[in-house]
Image: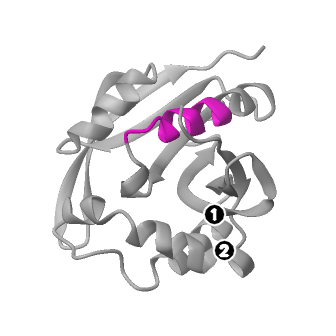
């Protein structure tokens, strides 16, 4: 892996602009929904929704500004959005793992998942991780399959803006230890 990353809670008072910049640095994601980019207040709305939703957390994926010198500061390069014990006890639902486009396909997403996975299993009491992926998002389906997730056979049709999207659910077992 080319980058050393860390996960840290996103604080609405400190990180809203940095989170919005991550959303803006992923134009390909928004094009999947035929949007020119994220809504201008997307970070603010997501942070408010996370605060109002029991068990929901946004973790920033950060890297040092200067390689091998964390004291020089860090920058947010992605986000992990998940909810604990939802839809059932012992299940974590991963709503999004997003990495800024210039840094995609460098192992950062896999590294972020590898950092979150043991915490979910050991500290949060989670035995299953679940993710819903848009059926047209082949890259995300392949990514989660590479992380050990398999299709459950379940799907939902959800409204996104003016359109409906089919989510395919994938899951993997987590083991404490």
Q: Residues within 10 Å of mark 2 (few under 14, many from 20)?
A: some
Identify the mark nearer the N-term, 1 or 2. 2
Percent across and percent down for residue 88 are 58, 36
Comparing marks 1 and 2, which lies closer to the viewer? 1
Q: Quadrant of residue 54?
A: bottom right
* Label disc, if present, on residue 75 of the rendered structure: 1
Is 82 or 143 nearer to us in this picture?
Answer: 143
Q: Which residues are magenta?
A: 105-116
Q: Secondary structure at mark 1?
A: strand
The N terminus sits in image quarter: top right
Q: Which residue is mark 2?
A: 15
- Mark-to-mark CA distance, 1 and 2: 10 Å
Q: Quadrant of residue 140?
A: top left
Left or right of residue 131, residue 118 in this image: right
Is 137 or 55 nearer to us in this picture?
Answer: 137
Percent across and percent down for residue 44 are 55, 80
Up/down of 87 relative to 154, above or below = below
The C terminus sits in image quarter: top right
């Amino acid at each position: 892996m080319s980058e050393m990353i860390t996960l840290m809670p996103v604080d609405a008072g400190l990180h809203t602009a940095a989170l919005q910049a991550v959303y803006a640095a992923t134009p390909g994601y928004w094009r999947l929904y035929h949007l020119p980019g994220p809504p201008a207040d997307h970070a603010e709305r997501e942070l408010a929704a996370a605060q109002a939703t029991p068990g929901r957390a946004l973790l920033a994926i950060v890297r040092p500004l200067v390689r091998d010198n964390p004291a020089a500061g860090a920058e947010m390069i992605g986000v992990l959005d998940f909810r604990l014990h939802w839809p059932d006890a012992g299940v974590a639902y991963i709503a999004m793992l997003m990495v800024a486009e210039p840094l995609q396909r460098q192992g950062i997403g896999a590294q972020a998942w590898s950092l979150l996975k043991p915490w979910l299993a050991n500290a949060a009491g989670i035995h299953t991780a679940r993710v819903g992926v848009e059926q047209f998002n082949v890259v995300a389906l392949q990514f989660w399959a590479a992380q050990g997730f398999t299709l459950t056979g379940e799907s939902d049709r959800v409204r996104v803006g003016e359109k409906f999207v089919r989510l395919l659910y994938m899951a993997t077992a987590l083991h404490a230890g």
